[in-house]
Image: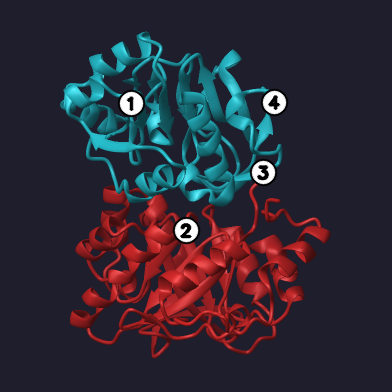
Chain colours: A red, B cyan
Amino acid sequence: MLAKRIIPCLDVRDGRTVKGKKFSEIKDIEDPAILAKRYAIEGADELVFYDITASNEKRKISLEFVEKVAREIDIPFSVGGGVKTIDDFTMILRKGADKVSINSAAVHNPTLITEASKRFGAQCVVLSIDAKKAGENYVVYTEGGRNKTNLDAIEWAKEGVRLGAGEIVINSIDQDGMKDGFDTTLLQKLKAATNVPIIASGGAGTIEHFIDAAPWADGLLAASVFHYGEIPIETLKKQMHKHQIPVRMKVK
Amino acid sequence: MHVIIDYDVGNLGSVIQSFKKAGFTLEVSKDPEVIKSAQSLILPGVGAFEGAMKALENTGIIPLIHDHVKQGKPLLGICLGMQLLYESSDEYGLHKGLGILPGQITKFKVDLNIPHMGWNSLRFEQPNHPVLKYIEPGDYVYFVHSYYAVNTAATLVADTDYDVSVPAITAKDNVVGMQFHPEKSGPVGARLLKAYKEMVE
């Protein structure tokens, strides 16, 4: 049975991670490769990097971290943030990332999903969706939550899969940073509507939140609870295992 | 010298890294002379079957791979590289493979997400096989694939469950196939490569 993936998310700016205070014994806490290795050793199943470097020019330099991460870790990882073109995909995959995630650019130019999927395979193409509640439904936002679109999040996810996305990361804008749980309603709707893996993002605050969301997601993504050491990955997985959720336990 | 066959499919960085960490003395090559003198061959691969098979044909070394196997020297296929070892695949039309291992590659027909992507656990079919020496039943490895081997019969060493039995490790004499990515499978992947190294040296 496939294990539910536990996925720490790291923000990178100018080639350096911006969070990650927990490993106090590490000197260079901002080095993405060193931090990535620690998470891999701790039992993370996969890592997600978002490059939040502001300018396109600087991002090219910033992305040099991808090569270093690929050398250091032996688990899969994805890279996103500012990905707009097939060339961006090529560059990131050549540097050794397993997947590339696209968000705003996919909304503006949906054919990018298809082109990337044809070129590199659906398993490389992650569609990241920022969704906000609007009554009974969820609306897609772009540009880091600044722009409201007229797209329904579930419909957009279905369209994204039809176009060739191999995985969906669903970020709940309402839950993001609130630490009061993943939006399980959103996850249930999405799971019922699609047949690709779903990664839940936004709202993780306690171990119970992971357990509650696990039936509706293939992967559970979080940032601060891991970066600040609030939830050790091994403890989290032990608790999930107790609740009969399939997880990859550390090997002896 | 162990040789990773270089036929222009995907990034080999992680594969090279993992074999080096396991202590293999490596070369990445498609040079016929290097292939001929290889102690063992490693066939990696990602992407689609037909394209990969064509890329391999373009290197002109397929006869050398067959000679290598006939001489009893070890060959390891990883992921799509494993699939190429089979008789055929029905990925986008019917395509012939190398025919080194018995069986065919076919698309998943299960009511689950496709690709089969993520960490799945191993069941041992041949618990005493030397490649399993350092790992336990139930250990997880990382899979990414939409097609899998069928009719592998007596060559099945370990499988995983995805509504159907998915051959994860197959072996026949000096040839071993791994459907998952040992280089992305954390410590379990490293242990498999350690055991494989002992088998071939």
Q: Is residue B181 above or below residue B93?
A: below
Q: Nearer the viewer, mark 1 or mark 4?
A: 4
Residue A155 in view here: no
Q: How far apart in space, not on screen, are marks 3 and 2 (Cα)?
A: 24 Å
First in sequence, mark 3 or 4: give its number: 4
Q: How far apart in space, not on screen, are marks 1 and 3 (Cα)?
A: 34 Å
Front residue of A115/A39: it is A39
The amino acid type of the residue labelled 3 equals Asp
Element at badge 3? loop
The amino acid type of the residue labelled 2 equals Glu
Question: Is A27 left or right of A249, judged from the image as shown?
Answer: left
Element at badge 4? loop
Q: Nearer the viewer, mark 4 or mark 2?
A: 4
Label 4 resides on the chain identified as B
Q: Quadrant of residue A191?
A: bottom right
Contact? badges 1 and 4 (CB < 8 Å): no
The amino acid type of the residue labelled 4 equals Pro
Q: Which residue is mark 2?
A: A167
Element at badge 2? strand
Q: Which residue is mark 3?
A: B139
Label 1 resides on the chain identified as B
Q: Which residue is mark 4?
A: B127
Q: What number is the disc on residue B93?
A: 1
Q: What number is the disc on residue B183?
A: none
Q: Is residue B92 above or below residue A155?
A: above
